[in-house]
Image: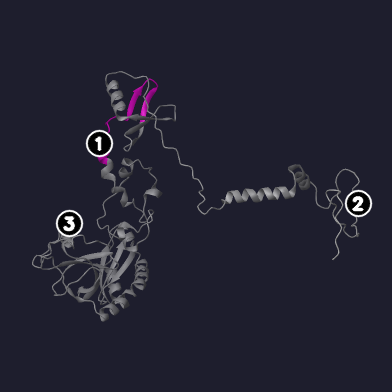
Amino acid sequence: MNVYDWLSNLPIHDPATECRVMEISFNQGSRKDFFRNTTTQIFEKGDLVSVEGVSGFDVGTVSLTGELVRIQLKKKTVDEFNPEMKKVLRRASDRDLDMLKQNKAREKEAVIRSRAISRQLKLDMKVSQVEIQADGRKATFYYIADDRVDFRELIKIFASEFRVKVEMRQIGARQEAGKVGGIGSCGRELCCSTWLTDFKSVNTTAARYQNLSINQSKLSGQCGRLKCCLNYELDTYLDALQQFPENCDTLQVAKGNALLIKKDIFKNLMWYVLPDSNKQYPLLIERVRQIKKLNQQNNIPDDLGAVEVNGKPKEELVNVDLTGQFSLKSLDKADRKKRDLRKGPPQQRRDNRQQPPNQQSRDNRPQNPPQKRDNRPPQPPQQRDNRPTPPIKKP
């Protein structure tokens, strides 16, 4: 949905050969179409324009202009000079925007009402979204269905209920996720709701080539199908796997038949496991070819000749004191020591925990009575030495 025009600053701008076709997006980028600019106005990306619709007009946002449109036209095999291509009427006025706002507010109620009508007719379908044209003369109902649905009676009810021209369009689960939108497991907005328009089939073989665990819950997206991003790096893995030897799933050694469990394209290693053992042995590609050649000559080597894979040790996290203060752990230790000193030695703390506070000790030793306070006035402290004090001279 957000495209950077990297051809706008290049010195190839020629008014005579400039592309007069623009790409207009509708309904927050969920639908895009091409329109010809027959006006004398110059539109930029993000401008709201009024274009030709079905028996009226529609309002969309300019998403692409210039030479990038020709690249998209060639990609989607659309003729740039097609006379049946719809036109851009004008820049969207305040009245057009008000009508767009009023009709867009009707879409949520239309979705709820259309689902109830389809349920009453007992049709095996699900209405996922309703898109009403800016002037309110046409409504497109996007639905999902596994089998073919006979909705001839449904169209008549929709036309009388909503007073619009009805168009039914079937979509898949991936298109529905793109229209609903959301955040993927990667933390970014869904690809199908931003830039992805061509939905290619994804199967579990793409996950197997990339050594991914076949876990349906982790490999599935919000649409319930396999994630489209499984195909992004598939070509890189296929090119790297061409360097690995073929027909090496089993190797014969003295201890038995070693079975291949995975291939590591980053370290050029092939991992094998022997029978009656759970240990995995990494082998180099040259070693695998050597063993395979020996097996073809009916020679069985003594061992696999596994290599050692020394992984980098994990770095220990060290708390660095940037403010010049003690760490929280040192403060906790100091507080714990203070509490222990107040409670006494460990043996005394253990005895205090065993005896209740108001209970006498188990032995019958007499307890010393509390000493009475002495009310005598305090005496001056004694001097350290016995030297007599000098007499005070009177003035």
Do residues under tags 1 and 3 come within 8 Å of each other at their CB atoms?
A: no
Secondary structure found at label 3? helix
* Residue that extends furthest to the left in the rendered view of this protein: 16
Residue type at mark 2 is Pro
Does label 3 or label 2 sit earlier along the sequence? 3
Q: Quadrant of the N terminus?
A: bottom left
- At which x and y percent is residue 355? 80, 47
Mark drawn on residue 86: none
Secondary structure found at label 1? loop
Secondary structure found at label 2? loop
Mark 3 surroundings within 10 Å by alpha-carbon count, few (fewer than 14), some (14 through 19), many (20 or more): few
Residue type at mark 3 is Lys
User: Viewed as shown, does residue 365 lie left or right of 280?
Assistant: right
For this rendering, which residue is in front, 362 or 335?
335
- Distance of mark 2 from mark 1, alpha carbons? 95 Å
Residue at x-position 39% and y-position 29%: 308
Q: Which residues are magenta?
A: 238-259
Q: Is residue 240 above or below residue 337?
A: above
For this rendering, which residue is in front, 202 or 148?
202
Mark 2 surroundings within 10 Å by alpha-carbon count, few (fewer than 14), some (14 through 19), many (20 or more): few
- At which x and y percent is residue 169? 26, 64
Residue at x-position 26% and y-position 54%: 199
Identify the residue position indicated by label 2 in the image: 369
Identify the residue position indicated by label 1 in the image: 242
Does label 2 or label 1 sit earlier along the sequence? 1
Magenta stretch holds residue 257: yes
* Colour setup of the view: one colour
